[in-house]
Amino acid sequence: MSALSPLRAVRARAGLPIRNGTIQSKRLASGSPHFNEPSGLLFGEKPLPPGQKRVKEGWENIWYFGMFGSMGFAAVMLYYKPDTSIQTWALLEAKERMEARGEKYQYEPSTTSSTS
């Protein structure tokens, strides 16, 4: 007697199918795929008669302000983002150390030039 035989008996009493010694689950779906058939209309909206204006749904303005507002906010934040590169830090650190030693940190070309 296998370990599944009590379970098979329960499933048989419940009317669930048992095939080839394996327990089959009961299918509850209709069996065919459901999807929206293409209608050829943009977003599935029928064209309005001439002279009528499309009425926006309640969520549309919220979506527009949220989407484009967050994109604008991100653009401003990226524009004013602090420069945290290692090159900038190293340049400032080198300038501070050179000033502390009393050296000039800007290149100044020599006033005497040799022409040949």
Image: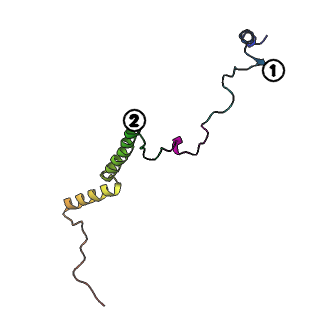
Of the numbered discs 1 and 2, the one sitting upstream in the chain is 1
Residue identified by numbered label 1? 20
37 inside magenta stretch:
yes
112 sits left or right of 2 in the view: left
Number of on-image labels: 2
109 sits left or right of 39 in the view: left
71 sits left or right of 47 in the view: left
The one nearer the camera, 64 or 19, is 64
Specify the quadrant of the image occupied by residue 36: top right
Q: Is residue 23 above or below residue 90?
A: above
Main secondary structure along the magenta-highlighted residues: loop
Specify the quadrant of the image occupied by residue 110: bottom left
Q: Residue visible at 69% across and 28% down?
A: 31
Disc 2 crowd rating (10 Å Cα; few below 14, some 14-19, many 20+) is: few
Which three-letter amino acid code belongs to the residue tagged 1?
Asn
Q: Please give the range of residues in magenta.
A: 36-47
Which three-letter amino acid code belongs to the residue tagged 2?
Gly
Distance of mark 1 from mark 2, alpha carbons? 55 Å
Specify the quadrant of the image occupied by residue 57: top left
